[in-house]
Image (cartoon, rainbow, N blue to C red):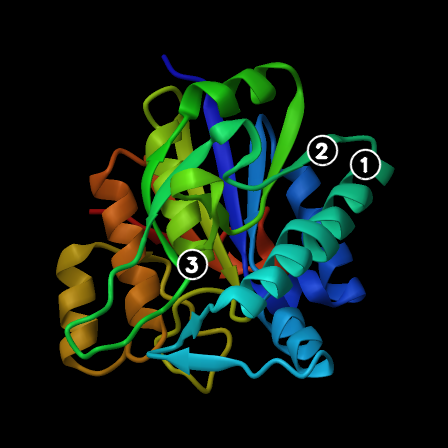
Amino acid sequence: MKQSLTLVKVGGKIVEEPESLATLLDGFIKIKGPKMLVHGGGRTATEIAGRLGIETKMAGGRRITDAEMLRVVTMVYGGLVNKNIVSSLSAKGYKALGLTGADMNVIRSHKRPVTSEGIDFGFVGDVDSVDQDAIAMLIEGGVTPVVAPLTLGENGCLLNTNADTVAGETAKAMSRLYDVTLMFCFEKKGVLLDGNDDDSVIPHIDTQLYEQLKAEGIVSGGMLPKLENSFAALRGGVNKVVITRADRLAQGGTVITL
């Protein structure tokens, strides 16, 4: 029987504000057994880029990352945001270690090609592989990995990579060794039946119910890629996926199954 592992993916807003970060980590440390965290940090990257006179350009909700923006996201994701989380966990007695994909060569990727619409995302990576054995070596040594959304491309180039993708691909890789639960944290308690009622959490969604909810327009917009990522992770070997709010890690939210 495999040992359990919980991987928590948390959005930028939650880890960028001291109070919400403290709430998240209070819930995170209550999770029993080995765990790891994958984070974003997009709002801070946009803010600091603006201060430096670097324009933020987006396409389809994704950040276009030229050479100057790559420097910003490397400083913000791999430095400021990551080390704030690591230092907070360390203060709580955890052996936390901040990682990018370049550290120990754990997440390799390739530069995203120009799209058929002619959009060049620049230094943006799509994940090719995750070294589950290297991450497991840390976990078995009592370390809590905190992963920033930067991956290693060709010739040692760092690539900006979507944090949901990093979390999903890492969870799938770790499922070869562990019984993995993947938790996506955002600002709601879970997937809602009524977008105006925060307590209308749908406790369980499988693929059949998902298609029904999508057809009825109950789930739409940004929730669609979250659920698609969830099903992709399950098809890749992850045992369970939960979508919830940062202060409800211990209570759970919407459980996703195939």
Task: Name the residue type under label 2.
Answer: Ala
- Residue drawn 60% across and 30% down? 32
Q: Is residue 207 above or below residue 241?
A: below
Q: Describe the element under mark 2 as helix, strand or loop.
A: strand
Q: Is residue 230 left or right of residue 164?
A: left
Q: Which mark is residue 171?
A: none
Q: CA distance from mark 3 to mark 2?
A: 22 Å
Vertical comparison of 149 with 99: above or below: below
Q: Residue at x 42, y 55 (%)?
A: 164
Q: Is residue 9 left or right of residue 219?
A: right
137 w.r.t. 151: above or below: above
* Residues tagged 2 and 1 counted as in contact (Cβ below 8 A): yes
Distance from disc 2 to disc 1, alpha carbons, whole Å, reads 6 Å
In the drawing, what numbered circle is on residue 96? 2
Judge the density around disc 2: few (<14), some (14-19), many (≥20) Cα neighbours within 10 Å.
Answer: many
Kindly report the distance in space between the C-alpha atoms of the residues bearing marks 1 and 3.
Answer: 26 Å
Q: Say the numbered circle drawn on residue 90.
A: 1
In this view, the mark in front (1 or 3): 3
Q: Nearer the viewer, residue 113 or 106?
A: 113
- The type of residue carrying mark 3 is Asn
Mark 1 or mark 3: name the one nearer the start of the chain. Answer: 1
Q: Quadrant of the N terminus?
A: top left
Give the quarter of the image for residue 127. top left
